[in-house]
Image (cartoon, rainbow, N blue to C red):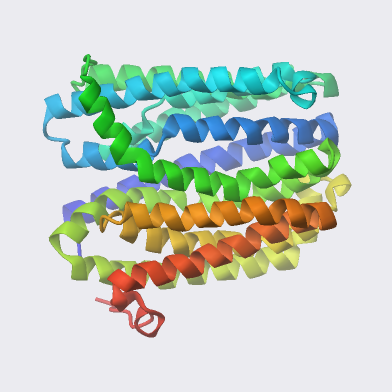
Amino acid sequence: MFTNKTRKQLFKNFLSLLTIQTATYILPLITIPYLLRVLGPTKIGLIAFSQAIIEYFQILVDYGFSLSATREISINRDDKNKVSEIFSSVMIIKFVLFLLSLIIMSIIVFSFAKFRQNWLIYYFTVAVVLGQTLFPIWFFQGIEKMKYITFLNVISKIIYVIFIFIIVKKSSDYLYVPLISGISYIIAGILALWIVLTKFGVSFKIVSLEKLKIQLKDGWHIFVSQISITLLSNTNIFVLGLFTNNTIVGYYSVADKLIRAMIDFQIPIINSIYPYMAKLIKDDINKAISFIKKLLVYGTLVYFIFSIVFWLISGELITALFGANYSNSVIIFNILLIVPLAIFIDNIYGTQLLINLGHSDRFSKVLFIGGITNLILCPILTYFFSYIGTAVSWALVELAILYIMYLSTTKYVPELNLKHIFVISIS
């Protein structure tokens, strides 16, 4: 399917992104059991609640550039002037959106007593958004130099782990956790900008308002889809925090962390393949479909096997990692085990196909419908069934999204209908 050179580059990109995800979750896993025991469920719940709120601003600042800007950089990578123009446009927009995020967050925090009484933690947590603003991951993905993302992310996580153990010693030190995380992201972001500007011949330039509008338009549908994804997963913790207390949020967040780890380990596959699929669909749609079939079958099989294994050992796993105080997290984890598999499949149909086929609007509509459905369903189920209802809401909506995404994609690519999907070419 690919030339040897292309296959080699694809593998290098996948390996780099896999290393990032491993560092992102393995290194913090060293600190999570420690923090859970030192801080306790209540403080962990407060940290999780603040992260849930700040994640909305992360989505705002990203604005879909993780896909739209990646695609533009990939297509124009040989034109240094165009690359500089895209880079400058995206960075200007991201900084404006970061300032807007600070203003909105300040209004929210000081307008409601629930937020005002813990105002400092929200400002410490927003430092992560500044780090994300500075770090042009989309640039490195576009030029397919993922090794720089790997190096900088590993450095960031090492800084985080070291200072967590040095500084956080008792429950009252909980404020340092988001602050340390934010500072480590900012350091990585500054280093990333230095590499882009000194190593790749990119220069920052003043761009016209028209160029900024183009980038905003290109990223819009993906931005809407990212908001929808946040309404699916992140809103659940926010709603749970409103209806219950920080301790229950702490129980839910433990299961949520494990599920997100399973979800995010598919990111190296999705992100490393995405630029190739953009070109492959343009050059040879039949080869692209053949590749997607294999990815769907083998990926689904792997996720299914891991889900069964984790379901069988869930009690022992959570107790071993987080302690007996978090036994309530087991049932949440078991309910949510269907989510990583559902997201993997709808990412293949949606991100790799609908977006690359030019149907970003359809992709965003499907996720938006799912997000709104969860926004309605989650409060109802949470009100009556507490954290179990919160988990059930996420699982049900993800399955519904998977079904709608499947129908939407097979409308344009009937070869990926279930009756064809398991006919795999081994060549």
Residue at (20, 58) in percent of width and height:
280
Query: Is 370 left, or right, of 192 in this rendering?
Result: right
* 18 to 400, vertically: above or below: above
Rendering coords of residue 95 (x, y %):
41, 19
Q: Quadrant of residue 412?
A: bottom left
Residue at (80, 19) in percent of width and height:
117
Q: The C terminus lies in which quarter of the figure? A: bottom left
* 162 to 221, vertically: above or below: above
Between 75 and 221, the residue placed more toward the observer is: 221
Residue at (49, 20) in percent of width and height:
100
Residue 250 visible, this angle: no
Rendering coords of residue 151 (x, y %):
41, 31
Q: The N terminus lies in which quarter of the figure? A: bottom left
Residue at (31, 51) in percent of width and height:
274
Query: Is 303 left, or right, of 299 in this rendering?
Result: right
Q: Quadrant of residue 145?
A: top left
Query: Is 210 left, or right, of 266 in this rendering?
Result: left
Residue 398 visible, this angle: yes
